[in-house]
C-alpha cells in the first residue's frame, strides 16, 4: 500500500492516474497522455513507471503504441484498506464515507440469471 500512496503523492502522477480512470476501460496511448498532460514524453515515462511499479497502472502493447490503463482493482484494494483501517472494527464510523462514495460510483446493473 505504501508504494501506491507514495506514487500518488506527486501531482503529475496523481493527475495522470485520474486521467486514466476517466478513460476506463479503453485506456490511453502514452503519447496521448503526454499531450493531454502537457508533459514531455521522457518525464511522463518516468511517472508511468512509478505508477506501474506501485500497481496503479497496467500497460499493453497495441501495434506500435503502449496503452495504459488505471488498475481499478488496485484502486479498490487501496480504498478498501483505508476504509477498513478507518473503521477499526466499528463499521458505523465509516458508513457516512461509504454513502458518500455511492453516488459517484454506482454499482453495475445486475444481469438476470
Image: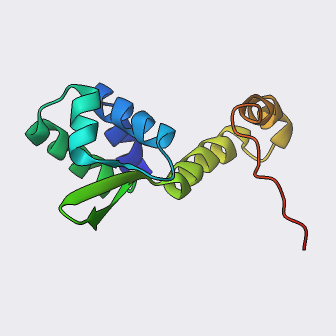
Residue drawn at x 21%, y 35% is 34
Q: Position of residue 65 (x, y in %)?
A: 21, 57
- Please identify the quadrant where the C terminus is shown: bottom right
Q: x%, y% of residue 41?
A: 12, 39
Q: In the depicted view, which residue is nearer to us: 28 or 47?
A: 28
Q: From this viewpoint, which residue is outermost toward the right?
A: 112
Q: Is residue 9 above or below residue 112?
A: above
Give the residue drawn at x 81%, y 53%: 109
In front of the other: 40 or 81: 40
Which residue of the protein is positioned furthest toward the front in this rendering?
63
Q: Residue furthest bottom?
A: 113
Residue at 34% from the left image edge and 35% from the top image edge: 16
- Does residue 13 appear anywhere in the picture? yes
**Residue found at x 26% / y 39%:** 32
Position of 28 relative to 98 (above/below): below
Residue 11 placement: quadrant: top left
Whole-percent x and y of residue 45? 16, 46
Amino acid at each position: 500500500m505504501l508504494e501506491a500512496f507514495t506514487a500518488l503523492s506527486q501531482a503529475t502522477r496523481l493527475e495522470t492516474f485520474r486521467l486514466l480512470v476517466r478513460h476506463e476501460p479503453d485506456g490511453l496511448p502514452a503519447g496521448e497522455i503526454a499531450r493531454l498532460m502537457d508533459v514531455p514524453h521522457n518525464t511522463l515515462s518516468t511517472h508511468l513507471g512509478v505508477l506501474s511499479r506501485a500497481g496503479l497502472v497496467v500497460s499493453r502493447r497495441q501495434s506500435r503504441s503502449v496503452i495504459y490503463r488505471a488498475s481499478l482493482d488496485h484502486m479498490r484494494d487501496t480504498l478498501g484498506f483505508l476504509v477498513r483501517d478507518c473503521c477499526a472494527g466499528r463499521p458505523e464510523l465509516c458508513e457516512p464515507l461509504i454513502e458518500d462514495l455511492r453516488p459517484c460510483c454506482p454499482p453495475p446493473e445486475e444481469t438476470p440469471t
